[in-house]
């Protein structure tokens, strides 16, 4: 009797582990596919990815590095971030194989953490009058600038709600 109980427990635990691996693989496949599209279409390189996937897929986290050189103003960086986020949201929400594993369907900007970094050349940041990095966290977009003389980010970061940025981009 004890051996049967032990075997059933092992089978149950292996089944739970298999399910977790399968939906994390689906999420990774989705992020890798998106990254390949962004590299092919916009020349951005994925430099990191992850997410929150404890019991279901809660967040997608992607970090991209720009092609060289790319000097953008805040409105240009905003438009690019909106393009990336809206495209990822659309692809995830239309992927029927991943849908059952999403903690929240449809996903929105609060389920995506994304960063785009902009460079003049390898290991050389853009001048401080241009956006060095734009990132999305918790429904807000942040813009950072880099002071190349001091070798650090400046204090002049800009923050705006994603919904407002979306309106500004669709207004044009």
Image (cartoon, helix red, strand yellow):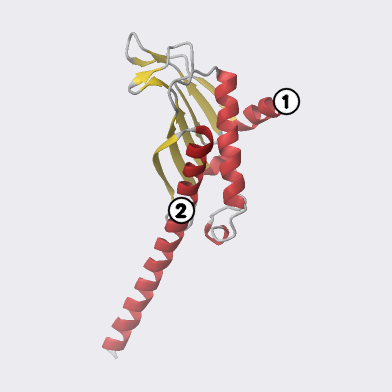
Q: Is residue 21 found left or right of 105 in the rendered image?
A: left
Q: Quadrant of residue 121?
A: top left
Q: Which residue is mark 2?
A: 29
- The vertical placement of 85 against 92, above or below, is above
Q: Which mark is residue 171?
A: 1
- The vertical placement of 145 against 39, above or below, is above
- The vertical placement of 100 against 121, above or below, is below
What is the CA distance from the residue labelled 2 to the residue labelled 1? 33 Å
Q: Which mark is residue 109?
A: none
Q: Where residue 56 sits in the image (x, y, percent)?
A: 48, 57
The residue most toward the right is: 171
Image quarter in which the C terminus is found: top right
Q: Where residue 126 sits in the image (x, y, percent)?
A: 42, 16
Residue sitting at x 45%, y 42%: 61
Q: Residues within 10 Å of mark 2 (few under 14, many from 20)?
A: few
Q: Residues within 10 Å of mark 1 (few under 14, many from 20)?
A: few
Q: Where residue 39 sits in the image (x, y, percent)?
A: 47, 37
Camera-side residue of 105 and 33: 33
């Amino acid at each position: 009797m004890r051996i049967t109980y032990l075997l059933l427990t092992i089978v149950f635990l292996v089944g739970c582990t298999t399910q977790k691996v399968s939906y994390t693989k689906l999420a990774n496949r989705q992020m890798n596919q998106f990254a390949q599209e962004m590299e092919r279409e916009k020349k951005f390189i994925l430099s990191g990815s992850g997410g929150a996937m404890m019991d279901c897929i809660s967040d997608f986290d992607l970090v991209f590095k720009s092609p060289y050189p790319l000097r953008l103003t805040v409105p240009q960086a905003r438009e690019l971030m909106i393009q990336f986020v809206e495209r990822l949201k659309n692809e995830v929400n239309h992927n029927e194989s991943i849908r059952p594993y999403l903690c929240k369907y449809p996903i929105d900007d609060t389920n995506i953490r994304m960063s785009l970094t902009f460079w003049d050349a390898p290991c050389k940041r853009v001048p401080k009058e241009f956006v060095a990095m734009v990132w999305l966290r918790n429904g807000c977009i942040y813009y950072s600038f880099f002071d190349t003389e001091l070798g650090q980010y400046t204090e002049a970061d800009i923050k705006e709600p994603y919904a407002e940025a979306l309106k500004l981009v669709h207004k044009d």
